[in-house]
Image (cartoon, rainbow, N blue to C red):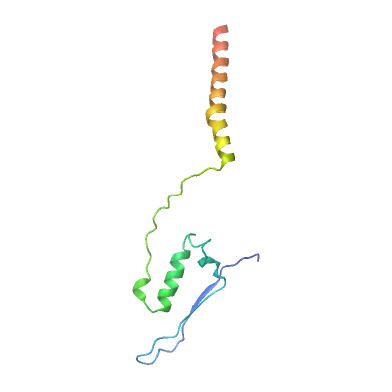
Amino acid sequence: MQGPLPLAAALTPRQAPEEGKRRAALVVVGNSTFATNAYVNFPGNTDFLLHALGWLAEERELISITPKEPAFRPFVPNPTQERALLYVQVLLIPLVTFVGGMIVWRRRRRL
């Protein structure tokens, strides 16, 4: 099977902890890139990291499913895309419409 394969596991001992002691817990993640700046905004990465830390800290009220806010990502074209948009929207489409109109006008005039 080709990778990369995401892998994560959460472990606790089967025995209950002694009175007054915290339960041992371990979260093992196969790769830490999900928590880097480049991938932190990918869907679920931030939630996974925060929930894993909340589980390790035994803060059960921090673990919840939160509603997702729609992300506003404006389209910012690079200079090549700007030129392409200019040529297509401002020059090509009106020119094709004008030529098509002239062809229809000439055909109808000949009838």
Residue occupying the far right of the picture: 2
On the question of residue 104 being in view, the answer is: yes
Q: Where is residue 110 in the image (x, y as percent from the top left)?
A: 57, 7
User: Which residue is at 46% across, 69% downward?
Assistant: 49
Is 65 rendered above or below residue 81? Answer: below
Residue drawn at point x = 43 percent, y = 50 percent: 72
Provide residue 28's location: percent of width, then percent of height.
52, 76
Is residue 108 or residue 90 the one in the foreground?
90
89 relative to 34, above or below: above
The residue sitting at the bottom extreme is 18
In the picture, the quarter occupied by the N terminus is bottom right
**Residue closer to the observer: 78 or 106:** 78
Count of numbered marks: 0
Q: Residue at coordinates 43% horizontally, 52% vertically from top-left?
A: 71
Query: Percent position (x, y) of residue 11?
Result: 48, 81
Classify the position of the C terminus by image quarter: top right
Q: Check the image and report above or below for 7 versus 104.
A: below
Is residue 111 something that shows in the picture? no
- Residue 80 screen position, x and y as percent: 59, 40
